[in-house]
Amino acid sequence: MGRYDLALIGFGGVNRALAALICERGKRLSAELGLALRVVAITDLRAGSLVDTEGIDLTPLLAVEPGELTFAGMTGGSADPRNEWVIREVPADIVVEATFTDPTEGEPALSHVRWALESGKHVCTTNKGPVAFGGRALRQLAAERDVSFEFEGAVLSGTPVLRTAQRMLGGLEIAGVQGIMNGTSNYILGRLEAGIDLATAIAEAQELGYAEADPTADLEGHDVQLKLMILANEVLGADLRREDVFREGLSNITQQDVQNAMSKGLRWKLVGSAMRQADGSVDARVAPLALPAHHPLAGISGPVNAVAFHTDLLGVVTVSGPGAGRTETAYALLSDIIAIHRRRPADGNTALRRVPQETHHG
Amino acid sequence: MGRYDLALIGFGGVNRALAALICERGKRLSAELGLALRVVAITDLRAGSLVDTEGIDLTPLLAVEPGELTFAGMTGGSADPRNEWVIREVPADIVVEATFTDPTEGEPALSHVRWALESGKHVCTTNKGPVAFGGRALRQLAAERDVSFEFEGAVLSGTPVLRTAQRMLGGLEIAGVQGIMNGTSNYILGRLEAGIDLATAIAEAQELGYAEADPTADLEGHDVQLKLMILANEVLGADLRREDVFREGLSNITQQDVQNAMSKGLRWKLVGSAMRQADGSVDARVAPLALPAHHPLAGISGPVNAVAFHTDLLGVVTVSGPGAGRTETAYALLSDIIAIHRRRPADGNTALRRVPQETHHG
């Protein structure tokens, strides 16, 4: 049985959903996977911090509405998140980072991850920021401290994409990745195909909870840009900065464009592509593309997301599933914890894949 | 470094392709995965058998046309395949079974696998027969002897489907699987959509090498039936026999049906579905279905195959990729060998997943 004490950094939708999973399927995790999970610390910008090294009772916390929760006054509680102190000093095995993504430099999540690794704790996160802006350095730090740095949820929530590249495609050369990695924009493109105009489609998506009040990050490809950086750097071994990734959003696509394309059997999709070039470099770009019907991403509809891996021996292998959602993203954290549990010393914390360097010969 | 001596049972297209991979990417396998592979025995119905415990030089064997290869007269060679003796007595670490699939009882491959496990050797196979007809008993035997029994290639060649269920979806409840698992029939349905009649489409598929001279097994769903049995038994924990899996092929589908459906936005596909019922049993059926455009399998075109897992926390997660091909299937064997290399004692050889029994509560 693997027993792990967790520190949850951020207690918004995702970490609350993880806490609920731990409550609801404790027995299953123990019977099926040999996992016993206990939360010993929680920090949150609004609620403050709560520490109990004997294990926090999560049920009463989950019964309180998120906006009304405050840890001040509880035993071991404080109105102050005390992030650095909690991350460095509370004796947790795994730090679970699920604060907001900062799209320009990844802070403060990047510091949270660094503090945790520096203090010899495993980290799992759903936060794109630290992985996109600090992935290489954080991986190296994790390797030095002999702990795991896992971040499946940073790309397609719980849909296994990074771990598929790492664990399922060993021995293959991956020449490129292409993905539909934003459910909001994909849903809206589908509505344009159905004859709805852009403004109405956006309002609809907002009502359904697919789009935020300001849909720019989704529609203009900023969200996909970070995810593509992560895929390019982690799967193809690139070292791209944000400015290296070309980005074009949906602004220039009209309902007419989408419907004209449909009549020719083409489907407009917002696609992130990272492809290795002849000189070994990686070209990465986010842009709307009109895909022919047989393209592996052409059939990915609505809020579903997908990533296609272009491999030498298998051709294209595609994984599709949810790209967002609280429980779906919380499952990504659970899958990270399972990976830590199954970790072998030999797995190390080096790049997911090596950049191919040798020529193939016998 | 993990060093493994292999015995190849069957030296047709798939094991020849595996031998070529071992020759071509030995350095890569060693650098990236810490794998050193050596072939110490080969048996083949036509070529006989060849044993060299110091390692067989594969290059000259691969230079001979398959039909012309004979091991008689070589040092350690014989015109007799000597399967049982080779499998039981030659000191190999892994027996790689890639003989033909017998669709009624799985022999002689089932015996090959049993002999190997009985003598304490790991087994990997691409052969549907032993897994479909003896999966449960062979898994149990492997567990008793503390060795691995791996068979990723029995379902979708090298596309990771069984291992995705086993390793990527831990902690989830899988309520059902649905797949397009035969490239020939899927290619032919696509041609009917394009306005080609059935006879012409079959002739075309035969010319392209997608369909065999007798296309019955592909078109009437016999091939999918075995694959679905494997998925139902291994992923859903069922214990189905072939007669438990309803089967209907494409005989009753006309070009007109397919085109009428298309005009309504529906696409006919030959779908294998295994779904857990309210009473815990698994209903499994192979039949043509007219899928709506948003169905995760509707966009799977031509020779591409796919399996969709219906899960509780993630909804539908789909993996698509090649379903056949010599190199693609040989890669499945390589992925099995990698899994054996990464094997931990805790991984065991029990069912891929447990049948859920407990109620979820906190």
Image (cartoon, coloured by chain):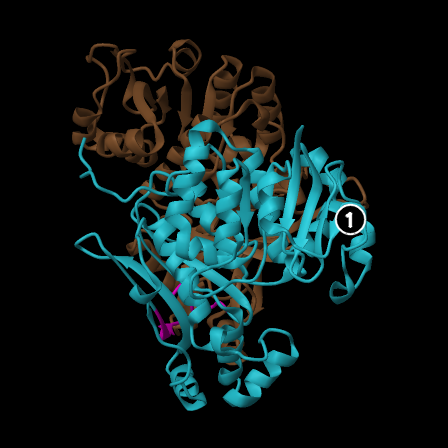
Chain colours: A cyan, B brown
Q: Quadrant of residue A246?
A: bottom left
Type of amino acid under label 1 = Leu
| Image coordinates for residue B67, horizontal then vertical, percent | 23, 31
A291 magenta-colored: yes
* Residue in the picture at 49% in, 64% down: A102
The residue indicated by pointer 1 is A58
The residue located at (52%, 20%) in the rendering is B147
Quarter containing the C terminus of chain A: top left
Q: Which of the two residues, A78 or B356, is positioned nearer the viewer here?
A: A78
Q: Does B256 lie within the magenta span?
A: no
Residue A239 locus on image (x, y percent):
31, 53
The location of residue B99, given as percent across then percent down, is 40, 30
Specify few, some or many for label 1: CA neighbours under 10 Å numbering under 14, 14-19, or 20 or more: some
- Say whether residue B285 is visible: no
| Boundaries of the magenta span | A286-300
The kind of secondary structure element at disc 1 is: helix
Count of labels shown? Answer: 1
Protein chain holding label 1: A
Question: Along the horizontal axis of the image, is B52 left or right of A25?
Answer: left
**Nearer the observer, A172 or B8:** A172
Picture residue at 68% right of the left edge, 49% below the top: A42
Is A341 positioned to the left or the right of A279 in the image?
Answer: right
